[in-house]
Image (spheres, helix red, strand yellow):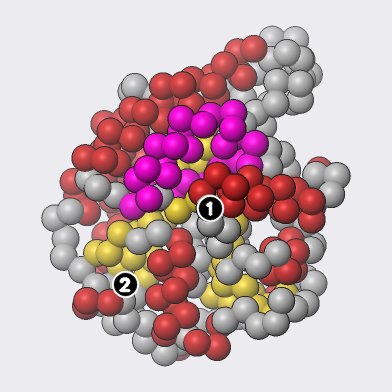
C-alpha cells in the first residue's frame, strides 16, 4: 500500500478530544536507542569521513565512536534517567541484547519497556528476509525479558512497502516510524490496523548533532521549545511528545548536562505524564477502542 492508502488525512483540530488519566494534558516518552554495528559492514553513520573516501573496512574510527556509547555513554545517561526516575523505553537491536547484555540487564532491572529495533542496525530495505528479521528480533527480546515486544522502531525509521503488514501479522500493537502527528493514529494493514505512536525527528539527537551539526546545547533549546508549544497545544486535547537519544551522541561528556536540564524544566510543570510506548498505546485504545488491531 502507498502511505496515502494506509492513513487518511485528519486535521488535529477536528478530532474528538483525548483525555489523559488524572487530568494530565501531555504524555512524554523517552526512547533510548541501543544498537550493534557490524564492523564487517559499512557503518550506519560516521563522525569522520574516511580520508580517501569510500567505505573502508575495518572502519575503526567510526566503529569505535559508536562503541563508546555502549561502553561509557549509556551509563552516564542512566544516572540522569535514574535521578529523575524516568520510565524509559529501550529501542534495541535483537543482536545487541547479547552483545551488550549489561545494558539490557540494567533496563530490565528498572522495568523499562523493550521495543523492537531490527535485529542489527541495518536499513530494513536491505535486510534479506524482513519477516525473519522481525521474528528474530521478537524472539531475542521475548527470550531475555519473558515478554513479547509490543512496539517497533525501524532502524533509521526505515520500512519496506510491507513493514506495517508484517508487524501486524507478528503481533505488534504499535510502531513509531510514521512521524506525522502529535497524537497516536491508526494505519491500515492487510490484516487490520496498527497504531503509530508519535516519535520525533526534531528532538532526535541524530538529526541535530550528526546531520545538522548543531552545538550540544541545541538539544536542550529545541526540546524546551518543543515541550512548551506542545504543552500549550494540549490545553483542549492531549498530545504526545517524544525525546530520542543515542548513547554515543547524548552520552558524550560535553552533551550530557543539556540532556539533564530538560527534565528540570519539565518538572516545573503540572499536567505531564511520563509514559512508556505501551502505556501510551493502552491509553489511546481506552479512548479509541476501534483502534484495536483486528484479526491477526
Which residue: 27% across, 37% down?
A: 80
Which residue: 41% across, 26% down?
A: 73
Which residue: 51% across, 49% down?
A: 145
Residues at discs 2 and 1 in contact (Cβ within 8 Å) = no
Asked whether the viewer can see residue 208, the reply is: no
Magenta span covers which residues? 87-111
Say which quadrant the N terminus sits in. Answer: bottom right
Q: Secondary structure at mark 2?
A: helix
Furthest residue toward right? 128
Q: Quadrant of residue 273?
A: bottom left
Residue labelled with disc 1 = 146
Instruction: Tell me: 66 left or right of 225.
Output: right
Asked whether the viewer can see residue 106, the reply is: yes
Q: Residues within 10 Å of mark 1 (few under 14, many from 20)?
A: few
Q: Quadrant of residue 32?
A: top left
Q: Which numbered marker is on residue 233?
A: 2
List x then y, in percent, for residue 283: 40, 75
Given residues 30 and 46, the one toward you in this image is 30
Q: Which of pointers 2 and 1 lies earlier in the amino acid sequence?
A: 1
Q: Is residue 220 above or below residue 14?
A: above
Given residues 245 and 289, the one toward you in this image is 289
Does 102 lie within the magenta span? yes
Instruction: Tell me: 203 left or right of 24.
Output: right
List x then y, in percent, for residue 112: 40, 50
Amino acid at each position: 500500500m502507498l502511505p496515502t492508502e494506509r492513513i487518511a488525512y485528519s486535521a488535529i483540530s477536528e478530532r474528538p478530544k483525548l483525555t489523559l488519566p488524572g487530568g494530565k494534558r501531555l504524555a512524554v516518552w523517552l526512547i533510548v536507542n541501543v544498537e550493534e554495528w557490524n564492523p564487517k559492514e559499512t557503518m550506519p553513520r560516521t563522525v569522520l569521513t574516511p580520508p580517501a573516501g569510500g567505505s573502508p573496512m575495518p572502519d575503526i574510527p567510526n566503529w569505535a565512536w559508536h562503541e563508546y556509547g555502549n561502553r561509557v555513554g549509556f551509563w552516564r545517561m542512566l544516572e540522569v534517567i535514574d535521578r529523575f526516575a524516568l520510565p524509559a523505553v529501550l529501542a534495541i537491536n535483537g543482536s545487541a541484547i547479547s552483545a551488550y547484555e549489561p545494558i539490557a540487564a540494567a533496563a530490565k532491572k528498572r522495568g523499562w519497556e523493550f521495543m523492537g529495533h531490527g535485529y542489527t542496525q541495518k536499513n530494513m530495505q536491505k535486510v534479506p528476509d524482513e519477516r525473519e528479521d522481525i521474528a528474530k528480533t521478537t524472539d531475542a527480546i521475548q527470550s531475555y525479558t519473558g515478554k513479547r515486544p509490543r512496539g517497533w522502531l525501524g532502524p533509521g525509521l526505515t520500512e519496506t512497502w510491507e513493514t506495517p503488514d508484517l508487524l501486524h501479522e507478528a503481533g505488534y500493537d504499535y510502531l513509531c516510524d510514521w512521524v506525522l502527528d502529535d497524537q497516536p493514529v491508526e494505519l491500515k494493514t492487510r490484516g487490520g490496523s496498527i497504531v503509530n505512536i508519535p516519535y520525533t525527528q526534531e528532538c532526535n539527537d541524530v538529526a541535530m548533532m550528526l546531520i545538522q551539526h548543531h552545538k550540544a546545547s541545541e538539544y536542550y533549546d529545541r526540546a524546551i521549545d518543543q515541550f512548551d508549544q506542545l504543552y500549550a497545544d494540549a490545553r483542549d486535547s492531549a498530545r504526545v511528545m517524544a525525546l530520542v537519544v543515542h548513547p554515543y551522541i547524548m552520552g558524550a561528556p560535553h552533551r550530557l548536562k543539556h540532556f539533564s536540564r530538560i527534565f528540570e524544566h519539565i518538572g516545573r510543570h503540572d499536567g505531564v505524564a511520563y509514559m512508556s510506548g505501551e502505556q501510551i498505546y493502552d491509553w489511546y485504545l481506552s479512548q479509541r477502542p476501534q483502534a484495536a488491531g483486528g484479526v491477526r
